[in-house]
Image: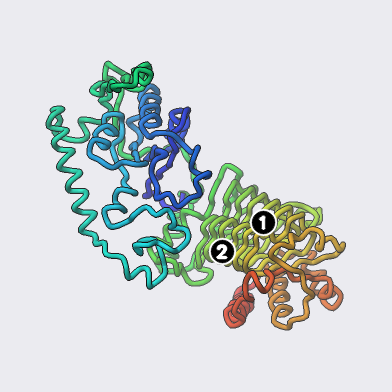
Amino acid sequence: MVNPRATVAVKLVAEAGVGTIAAGVAKGYADYILISGADGGTGASPWMSIKYTGGPWELGLSETQQVLVTNDLRGRVTVRADGGLRTAEDVAVAALMGAEEFGFGTAAMVAVGCQIARQCHLNTCPVGVATQDPELRKKYWGTPDMVVRYMFFMAEELREIMARLGFRTVEEMVGRSDLLEQMRVEGHPKANTLDLGPMLALADPSGALPRRHAQERNDRESDELLDDELLPLVADAIEGRKPVKLEHPIRNIHRTVGARIAGEIARVHGDEGLPEHSIELRLWGSAGQSFGAFLINGMHLTLEGEANDYVGKGMHGGELVLRPPQEATYFAHDNAIMGNTVLYGATGGHLFAAGRAGERFAVRNSGAWAVIEGAGDHACEYMTSGVVVVLGPTGRNLGAGMSGGMAFVLDLDGSLERNVNHEMVGISELDDDEDIELLKALVQRHHELTHSVRAEDVLDNWAIYQSRFKKVAPLPHVAPPPPRDQQRARRDALLSSSQRRPS
């Protein structure tokens, strides 16, 4: 959605039934399918974590090729194989079983000096390959030429195998499993009772169906993306000619609204995006999943209605505003206005929502600032940075795994203490002037943009409500407080934005 020029790759671990999964992935418009065997990797993972994970890539690749060919899906995707490929014979077998591209990890690492000590995760690599210790890194003696030489040897050996089989190109080999024969194991009669015939059989002996990739792109043509309709209308802003303001209805079939526009801005301008308020979109209705995903600086989206899950997913900058329709007669702070997993993995930007969020609000948030009026279970889970203000109740397990940032919660019923996960965070009173100024600035901006009744009540009775706010932040031994200068600069920018742009 963000970058229509990008190709999509899906990695599947070789195991029984992987062919069915691969068929679903191909129907889901993936461009590459990687079948990964169980014998690759450096072995840094604990033994019990990898002992029963996956099977040989040959089994998974064979099943995938047969299922894709049988269902006439093979021509739509490129199939890759990896997981312990070491010799040219491995490459040849993988090609004959249906792979067009091949991955090398362990063998390439060994070529540059890795001894497979299985301690990469301990920062104690004896040859200085997988370590940040400067003393150990001095021991590293590998060069890129070693990998190049290894690949040259592989290519030369593969050419010899191809010559024996009568192939000029690797493409001609793909899917020709009929040229493989089962070896007889001398001295092990029980092993010879195993029949690998079904694994080596051709799914389409007639050759009428494609056995390798034949289609340029595996893209869905029937998607009606709202961004495709809006993109030409905001071209002036993206090209820096003039700001653009648009109004448009939205339906729940419209997913990731704003993401493709953000991707185009990033392609032209990079991570810095556009100047503030370059693109302002006012939408009304019910938004589908991932509204405002991957938003970038210069974009300001206002939604009058409600939104589904994943609002602001991967948000990098800009501003998202959600508020009920003007004709709504209910209290926004008593009702949900968006779904679950809002601000998942966000790195920046602002979100203001006059209503409650679902579960896992701001999970893995690492920089976004947000104001909402209630949250479900697991809010601020694994949060690493940013500021969250909750003008209402929260569910249980607040702050689980939270290692950065802070949350201000309006604890009206005294339930916060039992709802917080105290393993990594603590609760404190709001007695720091910097925190109070930051909180009030966010609530003021929230009221300006959403016309929230709850925010208006809090501001009008600030002396009463201030004592009911509690601060939830990582314990001192978990993470130090965020730098005050950065926090202050962002707060001042927020206030100046309010003065420049009327609500």
Q: Amino acid at mark 1?
A: Phe
Q: Nearer the viewer, residue 423 or 436?
A: 423
Q: Nearer the viewer, residue 392 or 473?
A: 473
**Residue 182 seen in the current view:** no
Q: Is residue 328 above or below residue 156?
A: below
**What is the x, y in percent for residue 62?**
36, 27
Disc 2 packing (10 Å; few <14; some 14–19; many ≥20): many
Residue 62, numbered label: none
Contact between marks 2 and 1 (CB within 8 A): the answer is: no
- The residue beneath circle 2 is 300
Taking the spot 82% from the left edge, 65% from the top edge, the residue there is: 411
Q: Amino acid at mark 2?
A: His
Indicate which disc, 2 or 1, sits on the residue closer to the N terminus. 2
Secondary-structure class at tag 1 = loop
Disc 1 packing (10 Å; few <14; some 14–19; many ≥20): many
**What is the x, y in percent for residue 156?**
15, 42
**Residue 286 seen in the current view:** yes
- The residue beneath circle 1 is 361
Taking the spot 51% from the left edge, 57% from the top edge, the residue there is: 294
How far is the residue under mark 2 from the one under mark 1? 20 Å
**What is the x, y in percent for residue 482?**
61, 76
Q: Is residue 382 above or below residue 497?
A: above
Horizontal side of residue 447 vs 342, given as left or right: right
